[in-house]
Amino acid sequence: MDVGATAFVALSVAGLFLTTAGEPPCPVQLSHSRVVVKYGDRVSVSCTTADGKFSDIGWEAKNGGISIGRATQVNWTVESLKEWDTTPVCFINLERGKQCTHGPKVILYTFPESIDIISPAGSNGVMTLMEERNLTCRINNVAPVEYLVLKWFRNGKYFHNHTSASTNKKPRNLTSEIQIKATREDNGAVYRCEAHLDLEPGPQFVASQEYNIEVHYGPDVNCSVSPVMVKEGTALEDVCTVTGNPTTSVQWLIDGKGINQSIPLTRDKAGTYTLKAEGHTSIEKNFTILVLYGPELTCKDNQTVMQNVPFNLSCIVEGFPQPTLTFYKDHDEIELKNKLTRKDAGLYTISASNRQQTVTSQIYIFVNYPPSQIIELEDTVVDVGSNFSLKCSSSGNPRPEYLWNYYQTSNVDEEREDGVTYLSITNATADNMGLYTCEARNNFGNVSKTVTVTVKGVVQDCPIEITPNRMVVEYQSEGQQATCKSTFRDSHLDLYWLDQQGNKTGGRSWSVRTNNSFNLKPSCVAEPQHGLPRCQKHLNVTVYKRPDSISIDLVSSASSVVEDKEFQLQCNITNVAPARNLTVRWYQDDQIFKPPTGAMLTDCQPQNDPACDINLVHTPVNVLFTISLNVTREQSVAQFRCEALLDLGPEGPQPPPQIKSNPLNLTVHYKPTINVEKLPKTIPVFSGYPEELVCDADGNPPPRIVWLRNANEEPFGFGTKLTVSEKGFYRCSATNDVGSVTRDVQVILKEDYLPLIAGFVAVVVIIISVIFAFIYSIYYKNTKMRRYSLKNVKLNNTYNGNVAHNSWESQFPMTRLS
């Protein structure tokens, strides 16, 4: 038999006999117990016997059946087998009158004409995201189907099969259906259906068909929840990831204008951006982008504060998120106090940190304090003609300046050395007797002490009297006179005047002339007779000049001040004399207040030139008064003036000369405060009903409002109002240039039973309405309606109240029954 051209056969085990339970085996042998034949091919099977006791042997079949008789071998042969249900049987008739049969299993097959994958979309494998589609694998005209398996593969991986339980041997069509849902992972996927016809140990057949999937989706924007935190230097194209198929085009806009998304973001570029993406669909999203950058700490190298006075460091700290400041002194972390003492002066290290980085800066803090009590100055008793000194010392920062007040004579010298001042007196006389006052002062206060010097062995005071005892005259004026007279009754005195150069002016009167000098020191001289010593007394003359101008300024040259933070005002007075008699009145909103003040010459510095001592200078000078004070937020705009008074005592002009400055307006900045009445600690929110939190903060400059949630450092929202619908802890932070303040709120979620109550009430109302309508209908039927009878109807033309009319104008009299 030609196996390649006719059929594939499965060889049986030689000598296989048909057996029946309880009977001897059938004495025939088949050349093939199983035959696999392709439709239309030749097939041949031989049947032999070794038993000689039989009458005949043969084949029974729809085609090719033969009966040979007593031959030992017969063949069943079909040149072109086309019977799908053929079951040939070899039989043998034994002499014992019995017959037995034995036949091969014949499998007639045909390979499929085609295999296809069918979809409602045809061969188009383009799908949208999450689209569901049925794929049907169909194989046509194949037999036998009981040996056919349809297998499904996705990207080469087997995941499903389909078989048929049918035993029909004729050719049939077999289908297998699967359902797929498009995901992003399916983009580019290949689905394959394979048909396996396994006739082992006969022929095998494998056929397949592929279906390519392309998934269209997006654009998908993968970004953090707004606001989006990015580091400074990050480009917009790296802020969000945009994916999609087909390829997505991305455009960023701010204020409606497109921007280059590859340019790195800087801190000043934070704001609300719009992302537009075009691909399978179009999408537009708004994002608030916050640019993170590391701390920047700028401080003055040296800073000066006042002892026991609240202060703020002159440091500028920038960064986002807001940096945290840490202070170190002598390498130890400390908490910087609001008020410092002289012991707190020294070198400090300031560290500013946020999530980006940490930076440090070093400053030296000087602590200013007023002079301490004067020491080493005591009452002194000396002999006439002796030499002695007075010592005055005090401590303070800045180092104090010293002023002596005493009757000045030529034998007294002032000396200063290493923060201490001395008065050296040689050959003590009666003129050196009296009170000596030493005053120590700096810009922050002053202290003084007065002692008495007694000179033993001095003669009686000079017996003359000058009228007036003190004279006050204005610069470049003349006409006033002073006279001197003797206080002795019995002695004749020769009296005359000497000017400051020692020139004798003659007479007992002295006339004032102030055209050239501010330092007039005339004296009246008495030369007694009878050998008494000559003596003299000085006339106390004060020459004054009114100031040319006065102005008020802020020491820091700023236009605003901070609430409760000390600042300094300075009052500038030009070309006035004598400066020691000058006082200043300070006005705030036209009201006088009297804080401590101090005066300083602006033309020269006393530490460089002792002649610049304000108590010793007689000529016109420029004077600077300073004042330290603070304000509160109630004074949103504070107005200040200063007024200069030249108080020359009772001998001077009355009222004293005065001049007032123009006003200085200052804006008061203050730390934010949050209105706690509008933002209680606990707020209930009904489920499904969002609640609006209101954080109303007052501050100057106006504060920036940031919302945080559940102790998260990243901002959750911005602005005064925040709509919430979830429980949790929320924090409102209000910040301006002065400081910041926070308010914590707990949002509690509650169930809203109002809809249930309203629904119950509506049901009750409906039920009551139905009951009322039912009762009313019964009442109307029994009381309002009447019954009528149509018996003995007579037609007439008279209308009355008991006539019913029809459309032909007929009348039917009726009798009312009730």
Image: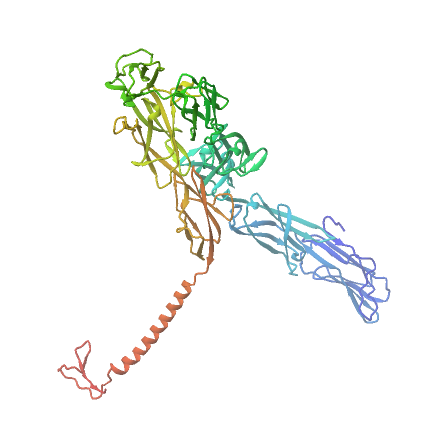
One can see residue 544 in this view? no
Report the residue that reaches farthest toward the bottom: 792
State whether residue 763 is above or below residue 284. Answer: below
Q: Nearer the viewer, residue 672 or 97?
A: 672
Give the residue at x 58% y 33%: 330
Q: Nearer the viewer, residue 566 or 708?
A: 566
Residue 439, x across and y down, in percent: 42, 27
Label count reads: 0
Judged left or right of residue 490, residue 702 is right
Quarter occupied by the C terminus: bottom left
Q: Is residue 322 left or right of residue 166?
A: left
Residue 771 in the image, given as x and y percentages of width and height: 34, 76
Res. 481 image quadrant = top left
Q: Is residue 559 visible?
A: yes
Residue 647 image point, x, y percent? 30, 28
Quarter holding residue 801: bottom left
Residue 794 lies, with reference to residue 7, above or below; the image says: below
Q: Residue at x 55, y 45 (%)?
A: 184
The residue positioned farthest toward the left in the image shown: 798
Q: Position of residue 478 (x, y in %)?
A: 24, 17
Q: How is the image coloured?
A: rainbow
